[in-house]
Structure formats: C-alpha cells, structure tokens
Image (cartoon, grey):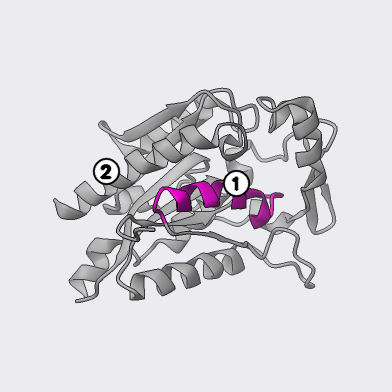
Amino acid sequence: MSTSKPTVVFSHGAWQTAAGYEQFAKKLNEQGHPTEVVPLPSVGGTETPLPGLPEDIAAVRAALTKYADEGKDIILLCHSYGGLVGSNAVEGFDFASRKAQGKTGGVILTVYMSAFMVPKGKSLLDMLGGQPLSWMSVEGDKCTAVASMLPQVAFNDLSPEIAAFCCTQLTHSSAVVFATPTSYEPWANGLPCAYIFCTEDNALPYPIQQQMAAQLGPEPTTYSLKAGHCPFLSIPDQLVEAVGKASEVGLKKKAA
C-alpha cells in the first residue's frame, strides 16, 4: 500500500468509542490513507474525576506529534464533538507553522464532518442554547444519549436492525466537556479548513452546520453528503471519496 497520501487522524464524537469508526478507517487504509482513530479519554472514561476536554486535546495532539515528527502530511478529520477537540488540538501543528520552525510534516487540512466549529470562548452548551438537548441525559458527571431516541436522531439513515445494534455500542461521555469553553479557532488563524455537510442529520441539523461553516469565509471548501449524523456507518464509500477530495485540496494548499 502506498503511503504517499496524507495520514488521516480522526477526532471522534461523543458517546461513540473509537471502535465505532474502525471499519471506516479500514476503507481509508484501502485507498492508501494511513489512518488513526484517536480514542478520546472523555468517552467511556472510568477515572475519577472523569477526563475532560484537556485530556481529549492531549490525546489528539499526541497523535499529531507522532505523525508530524515523521514528516507526514496530515488530514485532521473531526466528527461532531470531535470538532471542538480538533480545533484546540491543531494549534501549532499546521504545516505552515511547522515549516516556519524548520520542521517537516504537519496538518495540511482540518476537516469538520457534521462537527462543531465553536467560536473562541464559547462551549458546546452555549451552542446548544445553554441546556442539554432532549435526547441527552445528564446524571452526575456523566452524559448519555437516550437510547430510545437515537435511531431517529443519530442513525436515521440506517436500517432499524443496524441502528438498534449501534445504540448498544454507545457509552457515556464526561458531562464537563459540554461546558468547557474552546480557546482556539483554526479558521480565524489562517489554518486551512473544510466542512463535510450531512444534509439528513437530525443530531446536528444541516442549517446549523451551515451556520457554523459560514465562519470559513466567502469561498469555503465544502462537500455535501445525503446522510445522517454518522456517514462513516451509512455511506462509508461516499465519505471516503469526500475525504480523498479534501486530501487533494489540502495538498494543493500546502504547495501554494
């Protein structure tokens, strides 16, 4: 397998562990993209207190360090809550910043896939209107997704059988991550970014995705998929194609 294509580092969403993304990662591998789905400590954490956003950021930064120091071109692919993590983790890891320091390798494009682009100083709760959504349940330091509502919210483009199975694979997320403000906006600091819209998403609706992607400026790099919240489960081949196109854009921006 050729390793000339960019390495894809995946910052995944809340409630779904890294294992839920591995079949999609294999498809990217088959297309020549080395891929790592970074397990986020706040998802399914068992420590007390539960890990939060800083621990998630550190985990993604560790992966970025590994590949950047190997001189690799990196696509940082962020899904849902993972957008908040990726936005903060990418600071200082972009290709241009590393090149200015005499280093090779780095992130050539940050891709938000139905993911949160949170303005600096704001939290996910701020983006949700200050309160958890109706399908989110907070008990103590844990936040879970209400299983009975998820087939329609997150898995609405999967068969009932597969949606039911996916619900059994979910876990809790640390409640604190939803109230922790972000401190960095890659798009406002000259870092190349793109957005993959999921037009049938009931968890993070398309109009809200569009509002957030508007922060990318007047000529953004975007792609649209007719998919629910988890295209890596429902239409993985189309998502692989979109990531491939985004990778080509990233390489062109690097060369510019």
Residue 196 appears anywhere in the view: yes
For the residues labelled 2 and 1, the Cα–Cα distance comes to: 29 Å
Query: Is 170 situated left or right of 194 in this image?
Result: right
Q: Is 27 inside the magenta-drawn segment?
A: yes
Towards the viewer: 127 or 108: 108
Towards the viewer: 165 or 60: 165
Q: Name the spot of residue 151 as percent of width and height, x first.
A: 76, 29
Mark 2 neighbour class, 10 Å CA radius: few under 14, some 14 to 19, many 20 or more:
some
Residue that carries the numbered disc 2 in the rendered image: 249
The chief SS type of the magenta part is helix
Which mark is drawn over residue 177? none
Towards the viewer: 218 or 7: 7
Residue that carries the numbered disc 1 in the rendered image: 124
Instruction: Report the residue that reaches farthest toward the left.
Output: 256
Q: Amino acid at mark 1?
A: Leu
Q: Is 140 inside the magenta-drawn segment?
A: no
Which residue is drawn at the image coordinates 43% and 74% (left, top)? Answer: 66
Q: Amino acid at mark 2?
A: Val
Query: Is 6 situated left or right of 13 in this image?
Result: left
Residue 63's place in the image compared with 202, above or below, is below
Residue 13 appears anywhere in the view: no
Towards the viewer: 55 or 241: 241
Residue range corresponding to the magenta coloring? 14-33
Which residue is drawn at the image coordinates 85% and 57% (left, top)? Answer: 140
Q: Secondary structure at mark 1?
A: helix
Q: Name the spot of residue 35 as percent of width and height, x first.
A: 47, 58
**Disc 2 + disc 1, Cβ < 8 Å:** no
